[in-house]
Image: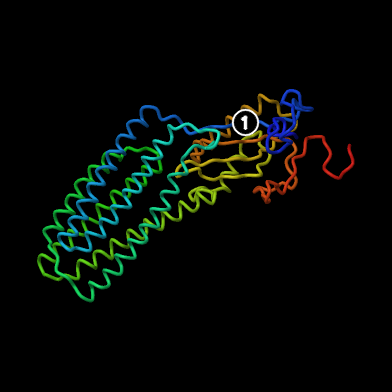
């Protein structure tokens, strides 16, 4: 069959060709139908959530300043470590806020997917920063375990208490975030920081009652473990997105089986699933249908496929090409080659394969 990109002089055909889908030979018979769905329009919900995320971001900056100041006054490493954990919250909230803002920013000729990847690059840079902070905390904790330093427990109580109160307010304010993965991740970061602040208060209580100062670096090591997990998750997710990896929570085999359950679908191949940013999966695929499948039947199949992919897998942006003869070879995953060549040929229904005799 002849893909519609080739009929329009796209990447599958000659870019200098001057023919359209109606004038191309066999266009009515050999049809590729493409369904393109952008990110859903959030409307008033987006504006409201944007304001809430901005407020949470600014309040988290206040917590960060309080805990840094408290750590300096109390000479408490655990407060500095907690401030490092708050920085992971700040990154998560900033990315969620950025994603909400970018959702309303239109794509252009140079950025056809918009500017969502800017947040991913920023997240990777922040993850590296967190790893540097983590190394510093671990070295300082090791030094203080060998040579404990006196700390001021009441300052630790006060600074950590401020963190608990403000983070609780932020977490409850963002709790109704629905299915937005960025916001849900930010909420988990916030409640994780509440746990870190509770650990600081426990350490301060131990020091106030027993004057056992090694409790402070021990608590800082526990919080460093939380920072390490957050930083590693951030690095792994951003690298996966930049490498165009499939979303980790997606079962590709099951998704293909679900696509094949739609009656008109005979085969699925040349499948690509990746993410533009966190919580923004994208899918392209070739779907083989019967040669006598009409345009109206293809439209109905396209609607069914997109409805199922959105409902079951959260994929709202799809490009699906219908074929009645498939590709050669007919592999589920496309083997791309340098220079834009792919390891398959598009063959029109009823046409000859390259190198064979015409029928």
In percent of width and height, residue 181 lies at: 41, 43
Relative to 53, 157 lies left or right: left
Displayed quadrant of residue 168: top left
Q: Residue at x 17, y 63 (%)?
A: 75
Which of the 4 image quarters holds residue 353?
top right
Residue 149 spot, x, y in % from top left: 17, 70
Lateral position of residue 327 relative to residue 171, left or right: right
The N terminus lies in which quarter of the figure? top right
Residue on which the image places disc 1: 301
Q: How crowded is mark 1: few (under 14 residues within 10 Å), some or many (20 or more)?
A: some
Looking at the rendered structure, the secondary structure element under dot 1 is: helix
Q: Is residue 85 placed above or below 175 in the rendered structure?
A: below
In-front residue for pair 123/268? 123
Residue 350, position in %: x, y? 82, 34
**Residue beneath the point at 65% across and 30% down:** 33
Question: Image height check: is 337 above or below 38?
Answer: below
- Quarter of the rendering containing residue 264: top right
Q: Where is residue 348 in the image (x, y as percent from the top left)?
A: 77, 36
Identify the residue at horizontal 36%, vertical 27% (top origin): 44
- Chosen colour scheme: rainbow
């Amino acid at each position: 069959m002849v893909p519609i990109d080739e009929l329009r002089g796209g990447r599958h055909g000659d870019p200098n060709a001057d023919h359209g889908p109606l004038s191309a030979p066999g266009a009515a018979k050999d049809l590729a139908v493409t369904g393109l769905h952008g990110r859903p329009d959030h409307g008033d919900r987006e504006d409201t959530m944007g304001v809430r995320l901005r407020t949470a971001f600014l309040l988290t900056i206040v917590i960060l300043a309080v805990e840094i100041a408290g750590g300096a006054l109390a000479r408490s490493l655990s407060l500095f470590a907690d401030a490092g954990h708050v920085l992971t919250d700040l990154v998560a909230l900033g990315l969620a806020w950025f994603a909400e803002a970018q959702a309303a920013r239109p794509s252009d000729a140079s950025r056809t997917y918009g500017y969502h990847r800017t947040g991913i690059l920023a997240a990777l840079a922040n993850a590296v920063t967190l790893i540097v902070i983590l190394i510093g905390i671990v070295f300082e904790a090791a030094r203080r375990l060998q040579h404990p330093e006196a700390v001021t427990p009441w300052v630790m109580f006060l600074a950590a208490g401020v963190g608990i109160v403000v983070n609780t307010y932020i977490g409850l304010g963002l709790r109704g975030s629905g299915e937005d993965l960025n916001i849900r991740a930010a909420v988990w970061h916030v409640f994780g920081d509440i746990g870190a602040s509770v650990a600081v208060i426990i350490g301060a209580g131990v020091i106030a009652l027993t004057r056992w100062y090694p409790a402070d670096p021990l608590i800082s090591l526990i919080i460093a473990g939380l920072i390490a997990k957050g930083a590693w998750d951030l690095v792994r997710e951003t690298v996966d997105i930049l490498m165009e990896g499939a979303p980790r929570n997606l079962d590709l085999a099951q998704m293909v089986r679900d696509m094949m359950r739609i009656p008109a679908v005979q085969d699925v191949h040349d499948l690509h699933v990746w993410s533009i940013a966190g919580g923004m999966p994208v899918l392209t695929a070739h779907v083989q249908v019967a040669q006598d499948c009409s345009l109206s039947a293809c439209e109905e199949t396209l609607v069914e496929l997109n409805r199922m992919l959105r409902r079951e897998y959260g994929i709202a942006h799809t490009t699906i090409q219908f074929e009645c003869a498939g590709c050669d070879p007919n592999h589920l995953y496309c083997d791309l080659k340098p220079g834009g060549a792919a390891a398959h040929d598009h063959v029109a229904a009823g046409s000859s394969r390259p190198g064979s005799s015409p029928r």
